[in-house]
Image (cartoon, helix red, strand yellow):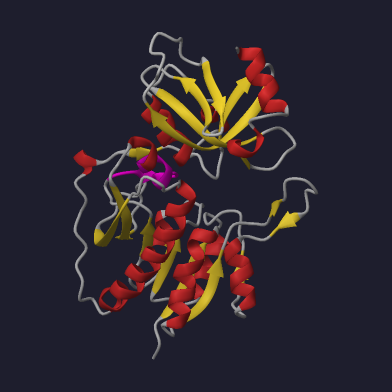
Amino acid sequence: MKPRLIFAGTPDFSVPSLRALLDADYNIVAVYTQPDRPAKRGQQLQFSAIKHFALDHALTVYQPKSLRDLEVQTQLRGFNADALIVVAYGLLLPEAVLAIPKHGCINVHGSLLPQWRGAAPIQRSLEAGNIDTGVTIMQMDKGLDTGAIYATRSLPILSTDTSGSLFVKLAELGADALTETLPAILAGQLNAIPQDHALSTHAAKLSKAEAELNWTLDAIVLERQIRAFNPWPIATLNVNQQTIKIWQATAVDNPLPTAAPGTWLRLDLHGLLIACGVGALLITEVQLANQKRQAISAIFRSGPLAELFKSQS
């Protein structure tokens, strides 16, 4: 008899894991995802990535606002599931829910636990300058990403990686790790190893307030933030009451080390160079208000950016 699984996930990161479970011929008896959210402009309700995928594959979707509701918990028990697979679901699983499936709730987490427990592990690992990252297959408990570990898989963080590119890589890596380890977990042949809580770090949720760069910081720190905040919330530079979104930049030596942090040093074919607390940041791709993303090499001679540079000179 095929194992009966409930799947809980919401964003694009969750989709490869659900796809891999279907490809492996597991019986997905239900899919849980967060309620539909209003879209940015028209405020029309928008399906999650997992809801789109599940409906396309004729899976039954449930969208409770909370799993604390006793009726929801009764519904979950009725599925008689062997395990509940959780991948970036975004809702808290109370202890009563953790105890429902025969083999508990198994989580695919986007970091090498116990590093980077919390909401933004991929972004925080980039921001911190880690040289590698990975995924963890974990038995969930009542804590925040504190459960015992079944398996980890790692990959290097490249100098060109953004959180967006790492999301794609880790989503696929997590799907592979899940399908590799799940048979042994369901057969009771794989023991989970408790985490060393003394080694834990916290990956706080990102906020838009973090997007505005602090030019007194080292250029290498700012470069990492730009990569970590891509594609959200996107690092920003505010000048003359105008906000410029920064999509790509590189830390370089400062040719004018006495210049105050935040000084615009040069605008040319290579990019916009701005002094930092240590070093300088060469910005190569930006987005001006009401415009699309553009390489500075295409817009440095004229237009709003050139005018702003003149005002800073």
One can see residue 99 in this view: no
Q: Which residue is drawn at 23% across and 76% down?
A: 188
- In the image, residue 59 sits, relative to residue 139, either above or below, namely below
Query: Which quarter shows the N terminus?
Result: bottom left
- In the image, residue 6 sits, relative to residue 276, either above or below, namely below
Instruction: Looking at the picture, tell me which residue is in the foreground, 71 or 62.
Output: 62
Q: Position of residue 295 (x, y in %)?
A: 59, 40
Q: Residue at x 50, y 69 (%)?
A: 76
- In the image, residue 138 sits, relative to residue 1, either above or below, namely above
Q: Where is residue 246 in the image (x, y as percent from the top left)?
A: 56, 34
Q: Which residue is outermost to the right? A: 42
In magenta stretch: residue 113: no
In magenta stretch: residue 120: yes
- In the image, residue 213 sits, relative to residue 186, either above or below, namely above
Residue 187: name its quadrant. bottom left
Instruction: Looking at the picture, tell me which residue is in the foreground, 257 or 290.
Output: 257
Q: Position of residue 148 (x, y in %)?
A: 25, 57
Q: Residue at x 67, y 27 (%)?
A: 305
Q: Does residue 2 appear to the left or right of 294 in the view shown?
A: left
Magenta-highlighted residues? 115-125
